[in-house]
């Protein structure tokens, strides 16, 4: 009886977990913002590409179409590189092992990195919307919220894919492998130009890529036609997230 009382008393006096999550989130954000080699390309490249190909060289519906797809493209780099390359570096440098040994919730580092990815994706999308609005593209408040929501959602499947890559390869190979995923996904999903301008095989294979499903969720926000049901797209994205996370978790438990 006394043992149970002492155990209950000790449990009731445990410190709350939210300060640990907050501290981990702040550390992750500071680490990201202190590396301009990661921050500047992640924030500026999609905006510069959209300004060139969507605004300056774009004709007809190109500025509108590319606004939606570039909101997805802008979320790719923070998710794939932020999870994939950084996780490989943490594994190789022993930081992941150290965090496992610390008295912190095991999900705290993952949630902190996920929040960082969501923040970057939303900031990029907001910058793209600002550039499009300055160029004369009409973006309603509802469309703005829609595009920001899709950009934030993109962090889930793309971050999970990055986590899967980072859990399987070393720090030296991670950037090259992420680039092999990053660039083809953008092209094959119609993020840089409509798939109707590419060979028919590209359109047939497009539903295999999570970025295509994200693009189909973003296009209706700006009045562009999309394929398939929104619920199907969300279901596919959640499925990709679950499978990639499960495989990454299995790998990390076995290898560390």
Image (cartoon, grey):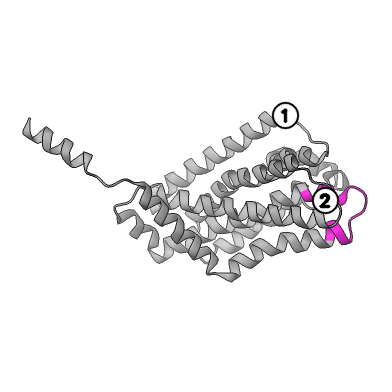
- Mark 2, residue position: 193
Q: In this orientation, which residue lies closer to the viewer: 98 or 91?
A: 98
Q: Badge 1: few (under 14), some or many (20 or more) residues near its Cα, within 10 Å?
A: few
Upstream in the sequence, badge 1 or badge 2?
2
- Picture residue at 30% right of the left edge, 55% below the top: 101
Q: Is residue 141 left or right of residue 176?
A: right
Assign a secondary structure to mark 1.
Answer: loop
Q: Quadrant of the C terminus?
A: bottom left
Residue 181 visible to an observer of this rendering: no
Residue under numbered circle 1: 229
Residue 24 counted in the magenta span: no
At x 31%, y 45%, the residue is: 16
Depth order, front residue of 185/193 = 193
Residue at image coords 9%, 35%: 3
Residue 8 in sight in this render: yes
Per the rendered image, the range of residues in magenta is: 53-67
Nearer to me, 59 or 164: 59
- Considering the numbered disc 2 on the image, is that residue within a helix, a strand or a loop? loop
């Amino acid at each position: 009886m006394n043992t149970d009382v002492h155990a209950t008393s000790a449990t009731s006096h445990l410190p709350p977990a939210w300060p640990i999550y907050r501290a981990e989130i702040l550390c992750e954000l500071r680490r990201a913002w202190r590396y301009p080699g990661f921050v500047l390309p992640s924030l500026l490249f999609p905006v510069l590409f959209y300004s060139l190909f969507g605004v300056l060289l774009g004709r007809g519906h190109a500025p509108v179409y590319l606004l939606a797809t570039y909101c997805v493209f802008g979320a790719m780099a923070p998710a794939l590189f932020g999870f994939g390359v950084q996780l490989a570096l943490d594994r190789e440098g022993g930081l992941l092992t150290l965090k496992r040994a610390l008295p912190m919730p095991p999900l705290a580092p993952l949630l902190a990195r996920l929040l960082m990815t969501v923040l970057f994706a939303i900031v990029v999308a907001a910058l793209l919307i600002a550039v499009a609005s300055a160029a004369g593209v009409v973006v309603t408040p509802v469309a703005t919220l829609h595009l920001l929501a899709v950009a934030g959602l993109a962090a889930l499947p793309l971050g999970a894919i990055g986590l899967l890559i980072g859990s399987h390869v070393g720090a030296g190979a991670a950037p090259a492998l992420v680039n092999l995923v990053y660039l083809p996904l953008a092209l094959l999903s119609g993020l840089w130009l409509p798939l109707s301008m590419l060979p028919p095989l590209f359109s047939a294979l497009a539903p295999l890529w999570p970025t295509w499903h994200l693009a189909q969720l973003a296009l209706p926000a700006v009045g562009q036609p999309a394929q398939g049901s929104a619920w199907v797209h969300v279901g596919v994205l959640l499925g990709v997230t679950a499978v990639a996370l499960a495989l990454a978790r299995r790998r990390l438990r076995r290898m560390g």
